[in-house]
Amino acid sequence: MITIYHNKRCTKSRSALAELENSGKAFEAVYYLETPPNKNELEGIISKLDIKPLDLIRKGEKVFIENYKGKNLTDEEWIDAMITHPILIERPIIISGDRAVIARPTEKIKEILG
């Protein structure tokens, strides 16, 4: 099963969702602003992406600029920041099994779809 962590107000996220719909493959859409991942889920996503938590942070978001810009936080503190402010989580994230990509650009979704 493929999972997309989706923000319906994001153009890139909507494009990735359309790509999944057109693929004909079964998938689940998680509206992460409405149902944010818990700490274990977020740690699992970061592990599958094989990145540092800071690399999953949207640094242009107002909440980042006002609360976190210029701060040197630990990985755990960045994870806590994303749990507190899910808008900070980069999107869209596409997961299939043990593989995951941030579908920016949208073409990166092909790494999951094959």
Image: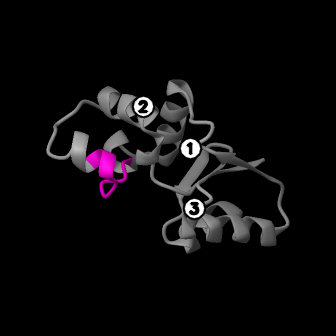
- Name the amino acid, label 3: Arg
What SS does tag 2 mark? helix
Neighbour class for label 2 at 10 Å: few (<14), some, many (≥20)? Answer: few
State the residue in front, 96 or 28.
Answer: 28
Q: Main secondary structure of the magenta part?
A: loop
Judging from the image, the colouring scheme is one colour
First reached walking from the N terminus: tag 1 or tag 2: 1
Camera-nearest residue between 42 and 36:
36
Q: Is residue 72 magenta?
A: no
Q: Amino acid at mark 2?
A: Thr
Assess disc 1: are there few (<14), some (14-19) or many (≥20) residues with their C-alpha within 10 Å of its C-alpha.
Answer: some
Determine whether label 2 and label 3 are within 8 Å by CB: no
Instruction: Assign a secondary structure to mark 1.
Output: loop
Q: Which quarter of the picture shows residue 112?
A: bottom right
17 lies left or right of 37: right
Q: Position of residue 46 (x, y in %)?
A: 47, 40
Q: Report how far apart the C-alphas of labels 1 and 3 lie in the structure.
A: 10 Å
Kindly identify which numbered label has been placed on residue 9: 3
Where residue 57 appears, as percent x and y from the top left, is: 36, 48
Mark nearer the N terminus (2 vs 3)? 3
Q: Residue at x 36, y 33 (%)?
A: 81
Question: In which quadrant of the rendered view does residue 15 lie?
Answer: bottom right
Q: Which mark is residue 84?
A: 2
Q: Which residues are magenta?
A: 57-64
The residue positioned 42% from the left and 31% from the top of the image is 84
Q: Which residue is mark 1?
A: 33
Q: In the rendering, which numbered label is found on residue 77?
A: none
